[in-house]
Image (tube, helix red, strand yellow):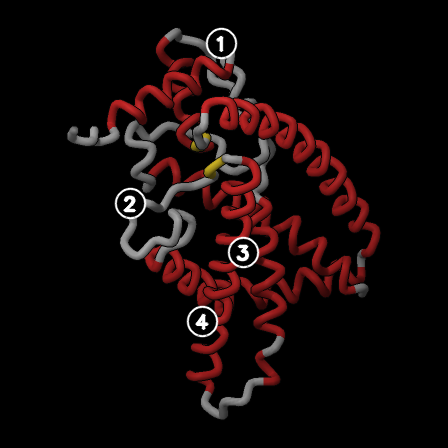
């Protein structure tokens, strides 16, 4: 089976599985969502988070290198795999976050409250979480991934649905990019950085305050101009900044 089809299938599965992980994490564990609302996670509006798709491709390739390990010990071989996987996931997270922050003036996530963070984009806590996730993938998921790829090689007609996923995903990504362009313009005009997840939560809070029906897959549509939400967030952020003594 062509390698590009394998990676396309993994990207598809990883993106959707990652969306579920992020949805549950933000609902029950995220300190940025104290009222425990259901918030559509990620950059896109559909049920996928591309970062996890890239991560699953990386983990699959890394674990596939196990047979080339220079360690005779199974323990050290697996430890090296988990650390390499954590480093790869951390690198993907940092690069994606940095591009969004520096090029688009949009902060997709914020770890600035975490110990040892780098620009609020990565931190030891979540790197350790990536290592744990790598271990879970190795022991509990990778065997099923191999089975799924074997099934796909025998049923190549299913690749039609992989192509359909990418068609819908690209349309979603383009629409999301248009929204980000508007946010980038506002950020440049106001010398500010847009906090993506905080903005979605603010829109949701506004919908609840006016008793409007939340639009889960259209989290930025509230019947109110987006710049007004952004202006409120900026005022809130400035009010919390410590004032310099004269």
Residue marked by disc 4: 83
Local crowd at mark 2 within 10 Å, few (<14), some, or many (≥20)? few
**Which residue, given by chain and number where applicable, does mark 3 sit on?**
92
Q: Is residue 46 left or right of residue 22?
A: right
Which residue lies most toward the right here?
A: 157
Q: Position of residue 182 (x, y in %)?
A: 59, 23
Mark linked to residue 224: 1
Q: Residues within 10 Å of mark 1 (few under 14, many from 20)?
A: few
Q: Earlier in the sequence, mark 4 or mark 1?
A: 4
Farthest residue toward the left? Answer: 245
Estimate the x, y position of residue 51 in percent, counting from the top left: 56, 49
Q: Identify the residue at image location x=42%, y=20%.
A: 204
Badge 3 element: helix
Callout in the foreground (4, 2): 2
Cα distance in 3D space between marks 4 and 1: 46 Å
Q: Earlier in the sequence, mark 3 or mark 1?
A: 3
C-alpha span from label 2 to label 3: 20 Å
In whole angstroms, how far apart are the C-alphas of marks 3 and 4?
14 Å
Residue with the mark numbered 2: 113
Mark 4 crowd level (few <14, some 14–19, many ≥20, 10 Å Cα): some
The numbered mark, 3 or 4, whose residue comes first in the sequence reads: 4
Q: Are marks 2 and 1 in contact (CB under 8 Å)?
A: no
For mark 1, give the secondary structure.
Answer: loop
Give the quarter of the image for residue 165.
top right
Residue projecting furthest to the front:
246
Callout 2: SS:
loop
């Amino acid at each position: 089976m062509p390698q590009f089809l394998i990676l396309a299938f993994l990207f598809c599965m990883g993106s959707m599985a990652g969306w579920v992980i992020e949805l549950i994490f933000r609902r029950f564990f995220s300190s940025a969502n104290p009222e425990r609302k259901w918030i559509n996670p990620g950059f896109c509006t559909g049920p996928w988070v591309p970062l996890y798709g890239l991560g699953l491709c990386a983990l699959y390739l890394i674990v596939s290198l196990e047979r080339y390990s220079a360690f005779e010990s199974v323990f050290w071989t697996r430890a090296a795999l988990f650390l390499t996987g954590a480093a790869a996931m951390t690198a993907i997270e940092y690069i994606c976050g940095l591009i969004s922050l520096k090029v688009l003036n949009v902060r997709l996530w914020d770890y600035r409250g975490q110990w040892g963070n780098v620009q609020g984009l990565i931190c030891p806590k979540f790197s350790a979480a990536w290592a744990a996730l790598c271990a879970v993938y190795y022991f509990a998921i990778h065997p099923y991934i191999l089975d799924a790829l074997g099934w796909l090689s025998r049923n190549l007609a299913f690749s039609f649905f992989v192509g359909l996923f990418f068609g819908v995903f690209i349309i979603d990504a383009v629409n999301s990019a248009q929204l980000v362009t508007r946010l980038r313009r506002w950020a440049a005009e106001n010398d500010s950085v847009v906090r993506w997840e905080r903005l979605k939560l603010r829109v949701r809070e506004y919908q609840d305050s006016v008793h409007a029906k939340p639009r889960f897959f259209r989290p930025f549509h509230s019947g109110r101009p987006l710049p007004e939400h952004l202006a409120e967030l900026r005022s809130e952020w400035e009010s919390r900044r410590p004032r310099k003594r004269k």
